[in-house]
């Protein structure tokens, strides 16, 4: 290795300089990593190995004397961590519990409002704000008022599926196929009050079966007595499918004028299709068919 | 052990401290001298506060520990540079030992203290790298990361430091002979 012309020959170097000169990079790495010098290496390398052994030797008691203080500091620094975690967890649990309780209350209130089990004033409030059914009227025979186009709850309606054929209008007296409030006397299936038809089974006197003659005042799929409609035609006072009809009114129009018009027989639109025109008290007798739209 | 300590286990932390405190203290004695224990206490406090967030194994923890110690030493040096201490005691007590004296002590009775003093006589950069590699037992890559140098530069500095140490140790018999 050429160190330049200024350096004296290697033989003239002092022992220390010679030893350091002989220390190669591999020797240095070996000394650092393994603290080991080759047996034929210079004495300086062995001294360095001994030096590194001493600095990596076992700990003295003095060095470990601060353990108690360090652990105490550790306990102080981390001791409140579980308590803090408990506080956070407790707060979180309280929040979750409060949320569940609030959700339960809302669900219960909504359910009660939907079932019309609330006091009338609260039910009215729920009806106006949440769209819940209107409160049952305390006076028998008086139908609930339909407000804002929302379907009102009628006796006999269950789970939103009416037992009549009227749909959408709780005030409907028609037989239109529907699942909303149907007044007694007009029914299709399920939960049928007396005087209403059932799809199959024994038909008591005064009630209709699916096919066959249908006495007046009862529903059937084919023959429709006066005052009742089939799926197509809807006489005055009866509702058709998904149509809001007020008493004495027809499909989709609940205005008093239209109701008056219907009751006066000036429209043919809602005349029943199959009933004899002569049986219709409002019929003009000129047409036995109902125009459907 | 490390994860248990991070969860707040006192025994695990005690074992962690016993394993790492001696090399940390020796490393700090090379760099910070007499204030090594104070710096070590600050380092452990910082480690305690950040232990719950620490992710890694034993080697990563050791690297983090010595990195923290090195930063503390640098901070202490900056602080002392801004506010120079007033010397009130005997100057002789504050004199640094020469490399020859440290080498003599290391050769006569190679104690840990004497060996550390001998390493501390190296230039700061060399002493720091030798301490990190030998005392902390970190590899070249981690040392390079800690000191902000390339691994090749770390190897060169290490080699240079060992040559200096070898020269120092080789000169001791001559000094003893001249007495």
Image (cartoon, rainbow, N blue to C red):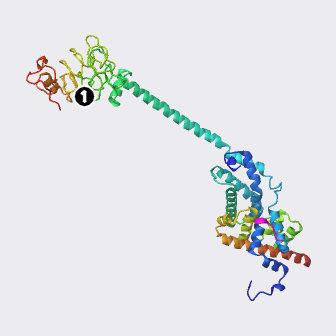
Q: What residue is pinned by disc 1?
A: A241
Farthest residue, direction top? A205
Measuring from the top left, give residue A140's x and y in whole percent: 29, 14
A265 is higher (above) or lower (below) than A14 = above
Is residue B98 something one can see in this rendering? no
Within the image, what quadrant is residue A264 found in? Answer: top left
Q: Is residue A218 left or right of residue A118?
A: left
Measuring from the top left, give residue A114's x and y in whole percent: 37, 26
Q: Is A24 in front, or is B4?
A: A24
Is residue A112 something one can see in this rendering? yes
Q: Residue at x 35, y 22 (%)?
A: A158
Q: Quadrant of the C terminus of chain A?
A: top left
Q: Is residue A106 left or right of residue A125?
A: right
Q: Chain of mark 1?
A: A
Q: Is residue A243 left or right of residue A107?
A: left
Q: Residue at x 62, y 41 (%)?
A: A84
Q: Main secondary structure of the magenta part?
A: loop
Within the image, what quadrant is residue A214 found in? Answer: top left
B129 is higher (above) or lower (below) than A216 = below
Q: Is residue A199 left or right of residue A60?
A: left
Tag 1 secondary structure: loop
Measuring from the top left, give residue B71's x and y in whole percent: 67, 62
Stretch of the chain drawn in magenta? A33-38
Mark 1 neighbour class, 10 Å CA radius: few under 14, some 14 to 19, many 20 or more: many
Q: Is residue A149 magenta?
A: no
Q: Quadrant of the N terminus of chain A?
A: bottom right
A10 is higher (above) or lower (below) than B162 = below
Measuring from the top left, give residue B35's x and y in whole percent: 75, 61
């Amino acid at each position: 290795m050429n160190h330049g012309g200024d350096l004296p020959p290697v033989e003239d170097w002092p022992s220390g300089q010679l030893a350091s000169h002989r220390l190669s990079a591999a020797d240095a790495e070996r000394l650092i990593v393994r603290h080991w010098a080759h047996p034929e290496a210079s004495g300086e390398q062995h001294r360095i190995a001994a030096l590194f052994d001493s600095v990596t030797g076992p700990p003295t008691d003095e060095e470990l004397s601060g353990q108690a203080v360090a652990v105490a500091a550790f306990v102080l620094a981390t001791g409140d961590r579980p308590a803090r975690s408990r506080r956070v967890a407790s707060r979180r649990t309280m929040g979750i519990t409060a949320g569940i309780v609030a959700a339960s209350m809302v669900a219960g209130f909504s359910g009660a409002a939907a079932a019309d089990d609330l006091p009338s004033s609260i039910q009215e409030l729920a009806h106006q704000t949440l769209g819940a059914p209107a409160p049952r009227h305390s006076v028998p025979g008086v139908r609930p008022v339909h407000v804002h186009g929302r379907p009102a709850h009628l006796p006999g309606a269950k789970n939103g599926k009416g037992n009549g054929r009227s749909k959408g209008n709780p005030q409907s007296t028609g037989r239109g196929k529907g699942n909303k409030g149907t007044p007694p006397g007009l029914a299709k299936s399920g939960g049928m009050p007396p005087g209403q038809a059932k799809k199959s089974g024994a038909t008591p006197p005064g009630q209709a079966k699916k096919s066959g003659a249908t006495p007046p005042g009862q529903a059937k799929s084919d023959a429709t007595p006066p005052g009742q409609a089939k799926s197509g035609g809807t006489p005055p006072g009866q509702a058709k499918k998904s149509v809001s009809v007020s008493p004495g009114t027809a499909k989709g129009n609940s205005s008093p004028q239209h109701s008056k018009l219907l009751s006066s027989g000036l429209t043919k639109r809602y005349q029943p299709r199959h009933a004899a025109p002569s049986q219709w008290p409002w019929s003009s007798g000129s047409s036995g068919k109902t125009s459907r739209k | 052990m490390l994860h248990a300590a991070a969860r707040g286990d006192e025994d695990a932390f005690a074992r962690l401290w016993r394993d790492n405190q001696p090399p940390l203290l020796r490393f700090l004695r090379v760099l910070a001298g007499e204030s090594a224990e104070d710096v070590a206490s600050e380092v452990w406090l910082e480690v305690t506060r950040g232990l719950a967030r620490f992710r890694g194994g034993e080697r990563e923890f050791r690297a983090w520990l010595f990195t923290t110690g090195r930063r503390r030493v640098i901070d202490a040096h900056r602080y002392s540079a801004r506010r120079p201490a007033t010397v009130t005691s005997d100057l002789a007590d504050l004199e640094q030992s020469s490399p020859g004296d440290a080498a003599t002590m290391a050769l006569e009775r190679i104690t840990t203290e004497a060996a550390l003093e001998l390493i501390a006589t190296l230039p700061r950069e060399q002493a720091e790298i030798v301490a990190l590699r030998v005392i902390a037992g970190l590899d070249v890559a981690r040392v390079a990361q800690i000191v902000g140098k390339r691994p090749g530069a770390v190897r060169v500095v290490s080699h240079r430091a060992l040559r200096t140490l070898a020269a120092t140790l080789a000169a001791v018999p001559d000094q003893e002979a001249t007495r």
